[in-house]
């Protein structure tokens, strides 16, 4: 009897295994490394996967090209590979290179469940970003070298214009990288060479050598310049998916964000890299954030990832406020958003709350969305199951409490090879940053929340930062442009007294190593329950200090603890500065030798 059971178990296991259908794109006419567009054949291969409970679509190792066919207007998204409504599908590149051409999204997955992407790279033959190297700078001009075969350009009406596959563009903005480490240059702000340098009169001196007339700040010969066009589309766009996994993926280029995950429920990124393609001599990768996670929910786990060369932050986790434009009746309001259509942030069944703009405090009531109706380009009507709370008007914004994620970022490297900051985070759910290495041009971690510009929602409620290394961060932040400190907490609400209710809550910074040349370890505004403990602070002389001589800048905070930290004897004398708070709100451990000033 026992043998029969074992055999039966083996038989069932075999049946389960055989239920996963394996399909190859080469079965549909795709020829690896042929440089022929694979768009239509991959579309057919994907459709062949639909009939199975579980399927694996394989790209036998090789190069696969995807060309924009020109059949859609520029106003419509050009997408090379589209997945819509799939369940239990794995895209396995088997180490392949996916190479794209023109203005397009490489991959878009929409309303899929349990989809895995793995084992491939994404790149563009001709990126919309270009690259130059400083050759010479004088008081009259700057001269740059450009690899014309990789980054073709023309001089048109005396202006430098880069050209590519069906496009021509000026330089919209740029980032400088040093010639040795290819890191963002030290102690420089945006437009380090000067504003509008690349719109100055241009002259091609010899093929690949361009002179731009006019005054520019001098940098060493050999300094790299990443020259960006207008930000456009994401490399991978994940939209309203459930339980999506990405692993062993290299994104060498994207015309906008490397990976955009919008309103996704459950994400796992493991060994995902948005990185400059060093084999091609590049210092740049995506034209915006490496990864961006607006309005997600469930667990978002990012581990073993390193990103370099992106033109904005390493990662951004956030919700979105929408503004109340008017109250229509007892059950509905009209909302608007400064940047995007308002209807995209809500679904029937979502739970929302109202936040007073002046105080940035949530109203205690929770309402359930019954209906969402788009009105024009950026407005929408929200109808609720319940009656609106008394007093709701245009001085409030709306926050979607359903679409708020738990976040884990573990064993990642955030190097000094992108402009701006490391990781941005706003979420009311549990968040953990653990065992990461931060070496950033701006703040390593930025916690914001605002109701006046980006409308980043999600007042923090439970955030732990532990067992990380922060090494010489803030190397290129000037005058608070990319942050105020290594860890920076700056919601837009600015306290005006020591009695105001804080915006963020329960932030713990524990058991980390700070290797720092500067004073500014922590800048915190409007936090209730802030702990900085058991950290080790080591002094370095990597760069000259340049910021305010305050280690702990606290504004409108409550229940702050600084205790059991170990400081390098070479570290400058410790200082804390308190604003809009009583001195009793700061509990300093007995071994902490901190000079405290209170300024209200």
Image: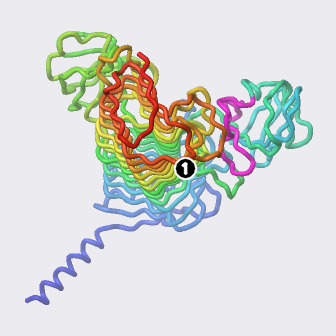
Q: Secondary structure at mark 1?
A: loop
Tally of numbered discs:
1
Relative depth, front residue between 324 and 576? 576
Chief secondary structure of the magenta portion: loop
* Residue 249 relative to residue 163: left or right: left
Q: Quadrant of residue 382?
A: top left
* Residue 207 relative to residue 88: left or right: right
Relative depth, front residue between 388 and 490? 490
Q: Is residue 93 above or below residue 101?
A: below
Q: Is residue 265 above or below residue 458?
A: below
Query: Residue at (37%, 38%) from the top-left corner?
Result: 562
Q: Kindly tell me whether residue 81 is visible in this rendering.
A: no
Q: Is residue 186 magenta?
A: yes
User: Split into 4 quadrants, where in the image is the N terminus?
Assistant: bottom left
Q: Is residue 597 above or below residue 226?
A: above
Which region is colored magenta? Answer: 166-193
Q: Is residue 42 above or below residue 290?
A: below
User: Split into 4 quadrants, where in the image is the C terminus?
Assistant: top left
Q: Is residue 133 magenta?
A: no
Q: Which residue is mark 1?
A: 307
Q: Kindly tell me whether residue 333 is visible in this rendering.
A: yes
Query: Residue at (81%, 41%) from the top-left corner?
Result: 220
Question: Residue 155: percent from the left, percent from the top?
Answer: 83, 32
Q: Quadrant of residue 480?
A: top right
């Amino acid at each position: 009897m026992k043998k029969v059971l074992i055999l039966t178990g083996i038989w069932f296991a075999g049946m389960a295994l055989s239920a996963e259908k394996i399909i190859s794109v080469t079965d549909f006419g795709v020829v690896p490394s042929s440089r022929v567009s694979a768009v239509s054949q991959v579309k057919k291969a994907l459709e062949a996967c639909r009939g199975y409970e579980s399927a694996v679509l394989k790209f036998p190792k090789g190069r696969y090209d995807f060309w924009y066919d020109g059949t859609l207007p520029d106003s419509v998204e050009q997408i090379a590979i589209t997945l819509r409504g799939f369940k239990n599908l794995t895209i396995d590149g088997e180490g392949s290179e996916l190479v794209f051409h023109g203005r397009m999204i490489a991959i878009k997955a929409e309303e899929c469940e349990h989809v895995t992407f793995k084992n491939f790279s994404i790149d563009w033959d001709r990126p919309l970003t270009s690259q130059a190297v400083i050759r010479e700078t004088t008081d009259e001009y700057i001269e740059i070298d450009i690899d014309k075969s990789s980054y073709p350009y023309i001089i048109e009406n005396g202006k430098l214009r880069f050209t590519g596959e069906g496009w021509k563009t000026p330089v919209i903005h740029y980032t400088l990288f040093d010639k040795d480490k290819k890191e963002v240059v030290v102690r420089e702000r945006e437009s380090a060479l000067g504003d509008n340098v690349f719109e100055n009169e241009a002259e091609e001196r010899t093929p690949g050598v361009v002179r731009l007339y006019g005054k520019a700040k001098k940098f060493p010969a050999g300094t790299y310049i990443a020259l960006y066009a207008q930000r456009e589309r994401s490399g991978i766009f994940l939209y309203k998916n459930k339980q999506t996994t990405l692993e062993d993926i290299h994104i060498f280029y994207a015309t906008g964000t490397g990976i955009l995950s919008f309103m996704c429920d459950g994400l796992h990124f493991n060994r995902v890299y948005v990185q400059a393609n060093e084999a091609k001599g590049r210092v740049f990768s995506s034209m915006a954030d490496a990864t961006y996670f607006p309005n997600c929910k469930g667990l978002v786990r990012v581990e073993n990832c390193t990103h370099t060369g992106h033109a904005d932050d390493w990662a951004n986790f956030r919700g979105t406020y929408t503004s109340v434009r008017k109250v229509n009746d007892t059950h509905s309001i009209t909302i608007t958003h400064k940047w995007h259509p308002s209807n995209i942030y809500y679904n029937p069944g979502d739970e929302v709350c109202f936040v007073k703009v002046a105080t940035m405090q949530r109203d205690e009531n929770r309402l359930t969305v019954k209906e969402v109706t788009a009105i024009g380009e950026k407005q929408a009507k929200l109808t609720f199951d319940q009656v609106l709370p008394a007093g709701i008007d245009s001085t409030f914004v709306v926050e979607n409490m359903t679409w708020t994620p738990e976040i884990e970022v573990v064993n990642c490297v955030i190097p000094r090879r992108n402009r701006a900051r490391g990781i941005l985070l706003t979420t009311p759910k549990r968040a953990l940053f653990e065992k990461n290495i931060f070496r950033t041009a701006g703040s390593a971690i930025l916690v914001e929340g605002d109701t006046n510009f980006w409308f980043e929602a999600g007042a923090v409620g439970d955030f732990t930062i532990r067992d990380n290394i922060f090494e010489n961060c803030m190397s290129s932040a000037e005058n608070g442009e990319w942050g105020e400190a290594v860890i920076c907490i700056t919601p837009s609400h600015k306290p005006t007294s020591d009695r105001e209710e804080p915006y963020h809550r329960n932030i713990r910074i524990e058991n980390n190593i700070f290797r720092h040349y500067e004073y500014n370890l922590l800048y915190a505004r409007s936090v209730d329950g802030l702990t900085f403990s058991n950290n080790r602070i080591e002094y370095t002389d990597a760069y000259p200090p340049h910021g305010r001589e305050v280690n702990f800048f606290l504004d409108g905070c409550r229940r702050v603890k600084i205790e059991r930290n170990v400081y390098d004897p070479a570290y400058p004398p410790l200082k804390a500065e308190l604003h809009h708070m009583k001195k009793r709100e700061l509990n300093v451990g007995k071994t902490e030798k901190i000079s405290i000033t209170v300024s209200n």
